[in-house]
Amino acid sequence: MSVPVLLAVTGAPWEADVVRRAERAPGIRVVRRCVDIADVMAAAASGQARAVLLADDLPRLTSDAVAALHARRIAVVALVDPSENGEPFGTEDRLSRMGIERILPADVSPEDLGRAVTDAVDAGPPVTASHFSGGFVPVTPETAGNPPPEYSNGSGRMIAVWGPTGAPGRTTVAVGLASELAAKGVPTLLADADAYGGTVAQQLGMLDETSGLAAAARSAASGALDMPMLAKHARQVEPRLLVLTGLSRADRWTELRPAAVESIWSTARMLAPCTVVDVGFCIESDEEISFDSLAPRRNGATLATLEEADEVIVVGAADPVGLTRLIRAIHELRAVVPSADVKVVVNRIRSGSLGSSPADAVTEALDRYAGVPVTALLPNDQNAVDAAMAAGRTLAEAARSSKLRKALQQLAAVVAEGFPSRAHQRSGLRVG
């Protein structure tokens, strides 16, 4: 039985030739010719095709559209102008970063065209999520555009910092952890992916309105995101610390589509040994629109980040309300992302909030009701936090001797155990 195919090459100078070749190609049959990506999506939603054959310059072709087609188990094959085929960092490279694995010259023979489409259908959609461990990549202006082969597979680690509603101090932990890892010699990328109102930029005194993460998402959607481009969207705040700022307004959440976010994290793994991501509290999956794979998801970026992360640090507050929320959040996270490697951090430990021995109370409650150990207990050190916030600096810069800073150093030491020792001997992460 031949494979039903959608053909979307309208406007290409070689359109007529491709149509003739597609009609003669063995093993496939063209069931509809589409004029643009919206037409492709509508036809794909009807279930009438198993593959799409499209031109490389199809208007509004993005990684989100490719991901949506893959979600419907529709193979995507791109045709490029023969004069551009094989150009380094050109059309093929851009299409590959969008998630298109089969790329052919437009003058391909009918036999090769039919074989490529049927092979793509048989292979199924590509796996988009991958987890790596143990590697690192030191980035300098000289190496950013041409990484050593041993690091080109994206072996950096990714740590998501997440927590329930109620402002338990998630961003303070994310910023502090990233800063302390950088201080230990681990080049680190700190990203603000809180779609409900990230404040990493404000905490670090970066008050411009430009969102580095949104800019990176746009580059990813167009297939233009690579290591130099991601480094360009980030800002250097310490010798080994880059920051990818978040959305300036919560109503811009639609700019963070899951496919683009996944592409950012994959690139980040190649850019830095460690990526620390501050994500929003809400992980509801929008079940009422789950039947529509093209609809934007309010929490899609958060869910994609948690699924991609090698470790998830869950932050809760040390008071009766905060502890209750933390326990519920851990169970919710396990249900939504069963594969998550969870480490629990309890913030604002102070006497009186949970009796005479708050540390023991926290440890016992989490062991009994959530079945997890506590990785770190952070003291309530509001003076240190206020000093850092007022100065727009990290705790390492504004309150070096504070109790909270020392506790974050210990947390960073635990996290840094997973990095190769040679990471401590490498030069810092710099924007080229």
Image (tube, rainbow, N blue to C red):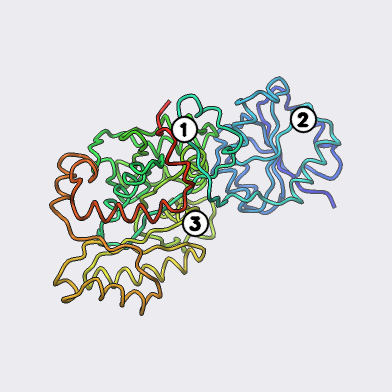
Q: Amino acid at mark 1?
A: Val
Q: Answer with left or right where residue 120 lies relative to residue 258.
A: right
Q: Quadrant of residue 281?
A: bottom left
- Please name which of the two marks, 1 or 2, marks the residue nearer to the observer: 1
Q: Nearer the viewer, residue 354 or 81?
A: 354
**Label at residue 18:** 2
Q: Answer with left or right where residue 41 lies relative to residue 53.
A: left
SS class of the residue under badge 2? helix
Q: If the image is split into quadrants, where does the C terminus sit?
A: top left
**Percent x, y of residue 325:** 30, 69
**Percent x, y of residue 418:** 47, 53
Dot 1 corresponds to which residue? Answer: 139
Marked residue nearer the N-terminal end (1 or 2): 2
Residue depicted at x 68% and y 22%? 84
Gap in Å between the C-alphas at discs 3 and 1? 25 Å
Residue depicted at x 38% and y 47%? 193
Dot 3 corresponds to which residue? Answer: 307
Gap in Å between the C-alphas at discs 1 and 2? 43 Å
Residue depicted at x 40% and y 54%? 415
Q: Amino acid at mark 3?
A: Glu
Q: Quadrant of residue 376?
A: bottom left
